[in-house]
Image (cartoon, rainbow, N blue to C red):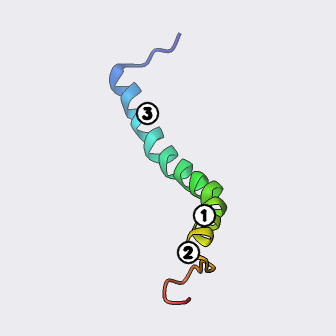
């Protein structure tokens, strides 16, 4: 069906993984951010700020 050599297959697979992995990691982090912040608030009892120097 597709006339692709083994080298081409692994080249495209490597490129796809290099591009897709950071995108999936960002989406996952964004989806779990609210749950993580709620868990930290519950555990430590104070609001979580983005700036580590602030309380």
Q: Position of residue 54 (x, y in %)?
A: 54, 90
Residue count near mark 3 (Cα–Cα under 10 Å), binned few <14, some 14–19, many ≥20 = few
Q: Position of residue 30 (x, y in %)?
A: 62, 59
Of the numbered discs 1 and 3, the one sitting upstream in the chain is: 3
Q: Secondary structure at mark 1?
A: helix
Q: Nearer the viewer, residue 54 or 12?
A: 54
Residue 13, quarter of the rendered image: top left
Of the numbered discs 3 and 2, the one sitting upstream in the chain is: 3
Residue 31, quarter of the rendered image: bottom right
Tell me the distance, in whole angstroms, between the alpha carbons under discs 1 and 3: 40 Å
Q: Residue at x 61, y 53 (%)?
A: 27
Residue count near mark 1 (Cα–Cα under 10 Å), binned few <14, some 14–19, many ≥20 = few
Q: Which residue is mark 3?
A: 12
Q: Residue at x 43, y 33 (%)?
A: 12
Q: Position of residue 7 (x, y in %)?
A: 33, 26
Tell me the distance, in whole angstroms, between the alpha carbons under discs 3 and 2: 46 Å
- Contact check, label 2 and label 1, Cβ < 8 Å: no
Furthest residue in direction left, as rendered: 7
Q: How many marks?
A: 3
Q: Which residue is mark 1?
A: 39
Q: Which residue is mark 2?
A: 44
């Amino acid at each position: 069906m597709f006339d692709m050599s083994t080298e081409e297959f692994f080249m495209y697979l490597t490129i796809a993984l290099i591009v897709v992995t950071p995108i999936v990691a960002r989406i996952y982090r964004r989806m779990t951010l609210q749950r993580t912040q709620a868990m930290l608030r519950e555990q430590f009892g104070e609001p979580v700020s983005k700036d580590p120097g602030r309380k």
